[in-house]
Image: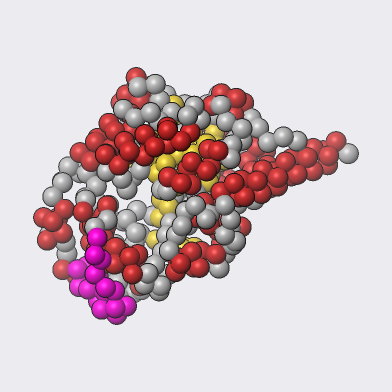
Amino acid sequence: MPLTSPLCKKLGIRYPIFGLAHNIDVMIALAKAGGYPVFGAARSMPEEIADVARIMKEELGDLPFGIDLMLPANVGDETDREGSKADLPQEHQNFVRHLTEKYKVPAATKPTFFSSQIRSQQLFEDQLAATLESSAHSFASAVGMPPEMIKRAREHGKVTFSLVGAPRHAEKAKAAGVDIIVAQGYDAGGHTGPIGTFSLVPQVVDVADDIPVLAAGGVGHGRHIAAAFALGAQGVWLGTAWLASKEHALSEALLNKLLKADSLDTTISLSHSGKPCRLIKSAWSDEWDSPDAPKPLKMPYQQVLTADIVAGVNEHEVEPLIYEATGQSIAWFNELMTVDGIMQRLVGESEAALTAMNNKLAS
């Protein structure tokens, strides 16, 4: 059975496979392979968002693509990162200094988004303005989707996606007028909620009514995609899959860690941002889970606290501490492949699974 859904026709894509990544080469390859790319721009400055959208439009022509932001309402108006850094609790500063010395983390030689910025409502507004003014076909929000932003996105002709982790979040998204709801289960990498994908998706489908739903969290095989249709979804949303792609070009230390991992090698931790976030297990998450560690600070202050050491870890590939947001589906991505190769595998497995299901039901 061919892998398709009404949403494919509506959006002008070949397969109902939506992919999120922070890498533009992955996004371009995904679109050309028949999927729907959504660039994760939460770590991008407004001018970078504009540049990414321009390049993707030039490369993809009429093929659609989206831009994803984080818009948490509980982040304040503070824009002075250095001032905020100076006010951090001494206990937390001492703990980060201890980790730096224990693992001999060299100082980073170049700034990163988090070592130069603090998440604030002003930054979110600037990111959103750049997204809405861009040539992106859609706008997605991973955390937070205020109704006024839905209205603004529609005024700019954007299709809107809202990622939700509970039925009540789906109710709010529906009331706000979102076009597509992504039901992201506990299995997912990155910021995620407490309900498993298998339980969450049908509940969100029931709430959504005629709004299309995508299943996210733990999707690593075509059988997962076939199961998503059985749960009432019209497609799937994947992020972890593309970390194991040649186009993503992760550092050797991080890639090796991911390719060796299975589902038990991920963990939910507050250590990344102050919000529950599924990461690949590492000494970083272990240290923050230790009895002697202070409780991670709330967003955005945890990343103000840790940005410098994380920048050093990533730049110098300090293997014990290096980590990435990674879902439980990493168990199915233990081989370095091209994005097109990953797509072909998923599509082939999905069509085989759908055919097998149909044959069993018909026998």
**Residue 73 visible from this viewpoint:** no
The quadrant of the image that shows the C terminus is: top right
**Residue at the front extreme of this rendering:** 58
Q: Residue at x 41, y 48 (%)?
A: 22
Q: Residue at x 79, y 37 (%)?
A: 358
Residue 303: x and y, percent?
A: 27, 57
Residue 361: x and y, percent?
A: 82, 38
Number of labels in the image equals 0
Q: Is residue 108 magenta?
A: yes
Indicate the quadrant where residue 102 lies: bottom left
Please tell me which residue lies in front, 317 or 144: 317
Residue 91: x and y, percent?
A: 19, 70
Indicate the quadrant where residue 312 lies: bottom left
Please tell me which residue lies in front, 77 or 201: 77
Q: Is residue 336 magenta?
A: no
Please tell me which residue lies in front, 120 or 187: 120
**Residue 134 visible from this viewpoint:** yes
Q: Residue at x 56, y 26 (%)?
A: 12
Residue 289 is left or right of residue 35, and the answer is left
Residue 85: x and y, percent?
A: 15, 59
Relative to 21, residue 7 above or below = above
**Residue at the right extreme of this rendering:** 363
Please tell me which residue lies in front, 172 or 66: 66
The quadrant of the image that shows the N terminus is: top right
Relative to 356, residue 84 above or below = below
Q: Residue at x 61, y 57 (%)?
A: 332
- Give the magenta range: 92-110
Relative to 182, residue 104 above or below = below
